[in-house]
């Protein structure tokens, strides 16, 4: 079965600390996509990144970086020099062709990140 | 701004009532997805429409139904509401019938059943 596990329920850091959010996934698909979304206190879901299963290159976008490792079925997200505005719930999600031949996003339970001044 | 519009933003209603949530997808997107976010269940896929037709069903209760209209906006109808239906309901859209591309979410409708 397809599954996304975010083992860290809550993380609390002080501003300027680096923080890594873990994501482990399970799928039998050979082609799949992984996503990260941010949900700030205002509630909306903000798309951060998409990665397909054939592209294991790490990606960096400003203070954000992502480490995709197929060997360990992980897609971890690191925020460098965290800021108070990074405080949010972060969701990892998996998309693939599931039973019935259709796609959907399966979300992890989310990690609540609190960045304190 | 994701380009996906959901109305209303907040809704408070009583048990047993019926409500309709509305979603306008991004311009050009043919697929609309509905998700429910509750404290105990997390983000759960409810249903998908593609170009007016139902394409996939997830954990949607029989009391809930949806449709997508010719102008591609979608409505999610929730009836015989129960306290446990209180949740944040998200709509997402994508250009194709799958979520392998980026799916952009609306701001959600927060439903409170009292």
Image (cartoon, rainbow, N blue to C red):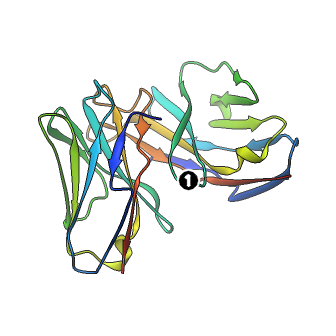
Q: Residue at x 72, y 45 (%)?
A: A85
Q: Is residue A83 left or right of residue B28?
A: right
Identify the chain of the residue marked 1, using the numbered disc in the image. A
Q: Residues within 10 Å of mark 1 (few under 14, many from 20)?
A: few
Say which quarter of the image contains residue B98.
top left
Q: Is residue B78 left or right of residue B98?
A: left
Q: Nearer the viewer, residue A37 or B3?
A: B3
Q: Is residue A17 above or below residue A70?
A: below
Q: Nearer the viewer, residue B111 or B59?
A: B111
Say which quarter of the image contains residue A10.
bottom right
Q: Is residue A81 above or below residue B77?
A: above
Q: Residue at x 21, y 50 (%)?
A: B75
Q: Residue at x 14, y 36 (%)?
A: B52
Residue A80 visible to the viewer: yes
How far across and down, in percent of the image, does residue B28 sit?
28, 24
Q: Is residue A113 left or right of residue A92?
A: right
How far across and down, in percent of the image, does residue A76 sit?
69, 37
In the picture of the structure, the residue carrying the numbered disc 1 is A42
Q: Secondary structure at mark 1?
A: loop
How far across and down, in percent of the image, does residue A98 sit?
35, 39
């Amino acid at each position: 079965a397809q599954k996304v596990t975010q083992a860290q329920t809550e993380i609390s850091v002080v501003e300027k600390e680096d923080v890594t959010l873990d994501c482990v996934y399970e799928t039998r698909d050979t082609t799949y996509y992984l996503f990260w979304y941010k949900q700030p206190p205002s509630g909306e879901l903000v798309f951060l990144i998409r990665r397909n299963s054939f592209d294991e290159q790490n990606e960096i976008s400003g203070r954000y970086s992502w480490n995709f490792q197929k060997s360990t079925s992980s897609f971890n997200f690191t925020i460098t020099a965290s800021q108070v505005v990074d405080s949010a719930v972060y969701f990892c999600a998996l998309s693939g062709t599931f039973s019935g031949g259709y796609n959907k996003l399966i979300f992890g339970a989310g990690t609540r990140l609190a960045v304190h001044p | 701004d994701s380009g996906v519009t959901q109305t209303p933003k907040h809704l408070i209603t009583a048990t047993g009532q019926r409500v309709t949530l509305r979603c306008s997808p991004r311009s050009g997107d043919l697929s609309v997805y509905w998700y429910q976010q509750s404290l105990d269940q997390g983000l759960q896929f409810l249903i998908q429409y593609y170009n007016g037709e139902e394409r996939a069903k997830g954990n949607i209760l029989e009391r809930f139904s949806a449709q997508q209209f010719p102008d591609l906006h979608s409505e999610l109808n929730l009836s015989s509401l129960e306290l446990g239906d209180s949740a944040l309901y998200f709509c997402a859209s994508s250009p194709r019938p799958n979520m392998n591309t980026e799916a952009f979410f609306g701001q959600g409708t927060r439903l409170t059943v009292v």
